[in-house]
Amino acid sequence: MLKSSCKSRRFPWKIFPVLSLGLAFCLSAGALGCGPKMVIWNGKRIPLEVAAKIDFARAEDKFQLKNWAKAYPEFEHFQGTYPESKLADQAFFRMGEIRLNEKNYPEALTLFSEFVRRFPLSSLVREALIRQGLCYHQLGRDEEMVSLLSELRESGGEKERAALDFVLAQGYEKLGRFYQALLSLQSALSLLEDEKAEELRKKGVEIIRNKLSENELGRVLNDLVPEYFLAEALIELAHRKVNRQDWKGADKLLTDELGRTPVFNRRGEVESFLANIKDWNVANPNRIGLIVPLSGRYQLFGEQALKGVLLAAGVFGGDSPQGGTFQVVIQDAESDPQAATQAVENLVLRDHVLAIIGPLLSPTSEAASRRAEILKIPLISLSQKEDLTKSRRYVFRLGLTHSQQVESLVTYSMENLGMRKFAILYPKDSYGENFIFRFWDEVKKRGGEIRGVEGYDPKSTDFGDQIKALTGLSEPNPEEVKLFEKAGIELTPIIDFDAIFIPDSYRNGGLIAPQLAYYGVTDVKILGTGSFNHPDYLRLGKPYVNGTILTDGFFRESARPATREFYQKYQEAYGEDPTVISAQAFDVTRLLITLSRNFGVKDRESLRESLLGVEGFPGATGNIKSASNGELIRPLFLLTVTGDEFEEIE
């Protein structure tokens, strides 16, 4: 513990009235021999300020190492021990910074507010006020943050103003003052030239595209500095006019602005967009677009579709209808809906394709379909998304949907095999849950019964509890068990269903089949989806998967002529087996090329009408016909397991 070594002295001020003022001055300066205040520190007598510096340095070392738990109590102790030290304000400031770093914003706000009150003359007051504003922002008190920081930025240096503008922009955005947020971002950009500037630009673009009204976009054109967001606002405003099919309005907007502002960033892009608008409805009848994921998590599926399209387009030796190579413009949308929307615009306004194939994924398909409908270009999706074509005139789909699989499976089971009663064993995930409701509805619609439904963890390998629950073997009455045992009666499962539907992967399906047999469920059919169409289903489940019935959109061993021909050509071109995705992409491409070359289709509108009239087009996935709702439908492949292989049910 520190001890002072300078004792206080009393002086008879009344005896020395003339000298009192000067003597006080001398005392304050240590002129009477007191000198700087001394303390006992670790057994040594040293000046108090020296001891303060040593203790501060120790706490500071822990602060720099980000050891907040140890640094905070040391700075707090410093405050109590050295309240008059020249470092007292720095120690208190560090306490606030520690709480801020710990994201303890309420306490940090209290500390910085107290700092300003306690140390009004400190050089750190401005920094404390800025951090006070940051705490306001984190606590959702953005009005207070904006009020405080907007005043501080006026007297700050360039880097500080840029940082404050960025925080202010976030506050304005939270308050719904999007135009003001954009002004703050522009101000920050005018002061920055580092990698942070790109982050600010992206944020500004996001606000322009998603937050500003058309009136605010007009203000951007008039008020903001041209080199930052003018081009983005101009193109966005033109896009909104295009969305309303106001092509003339978009044309006039771009033409007027190009004439009014002769020099601005991305002028060439605006000029290109204007040129595209003028002939947006012009289409090359020998050119189609493809939107698939060619990077990211779903790249493999995109490559499968691409291979089918290129094979049908005649890239491998004039295999397209009537010979000759068809042009294919490829756009990678990954799994990003915004990228899919942009891809549609590029294919229509820049590349002038006749039609678009894809996307594959549900989110990208929905986004692309909305834009295709606005731009009036036929789009044939390969997605499984239900109701994608509903209420849309230009959107078609050739995909393997859950509804199609369920309808095919239930129709065959009930009409051809005479089944009436079903059980469902499903994984508790989106795939399984989507299928069970559709299966249940289809069975009920046809007058059948669902006798039991049990779900399981998709990662499980033991399905005994669920199987026992379906067959009445779970949790029997103990007294009944004893009676049965004494009488020599063995408990047997109650199987009151003809088939059990398992909408899961080939892995789980192959594991479940032997367990069904183990619990005595042997005289029922296993029904599955296209996911069972895999060699490992046979390997894992044999011989208990024998007789399984499943449906799929493609079967490489099919005897159908168009399927065999496609399989052979695909093998020759790529040296691998095709998938349902590559087969569907192949069929759609051949269909478009056939309509373009054999039926005189030269523009998008006549192509749309021709697609609605398709009847019996021979494809690798079956004979395709169009429905009035834009679905391109064909009979699915019904398969069964016989021994060690899948066989097509004729």
Image (tube, rainbow, N blue to C red):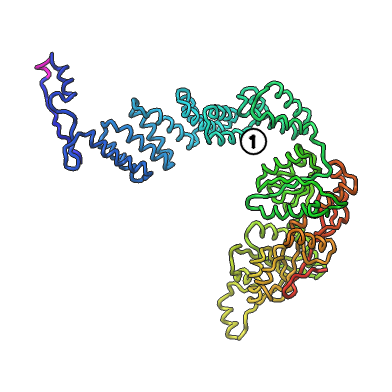
Q: Is residue 53 above or below residue 289?
A: above
Residue 433 shows in this picture: yes
Range of residues picked out in magenta: 13-17
Q: Position of residue 4 (x, y in %)?
A: 17, 35
Q: Nearer the viewer, residue 174 or 153?
A: 153
Q: Nearer the viewer, residue 15 or 2?
A: 2
Residue 36 shown in magenta: no
* 207 horizontally vs 321: left or right: left
Question: Which residue does the image show at 85% across and 41% down from the upper left?
Answer: 603
Q: Nearer the viewer, residue 309 or 36?
A: 309
Q: Residue furthest front?
A: 317
Q: Position of residue 368 (x, y in %)?
A: 72, 44
Where residue 370 sits, quadrant-wise, is top right
Residue 498 shows in this picture: no
* 646 horizontally vs 175: left or right: right
Which class describes the residues within 10 Å of circle 1: few (<14), some (14-19), or many (20+)? few
Examine the residues drawn in magenta and state their main secondary structure: loop
Q: Position of residue 577 (x, y in %)?
A: 73, 62
On the image, numbered disc 1 is attached to which residue?
210
Q: Nearer the viewer, residue 189 or 83?
A: 189
For the residue marked with disc 1, what is the amino acid?
A: Asn
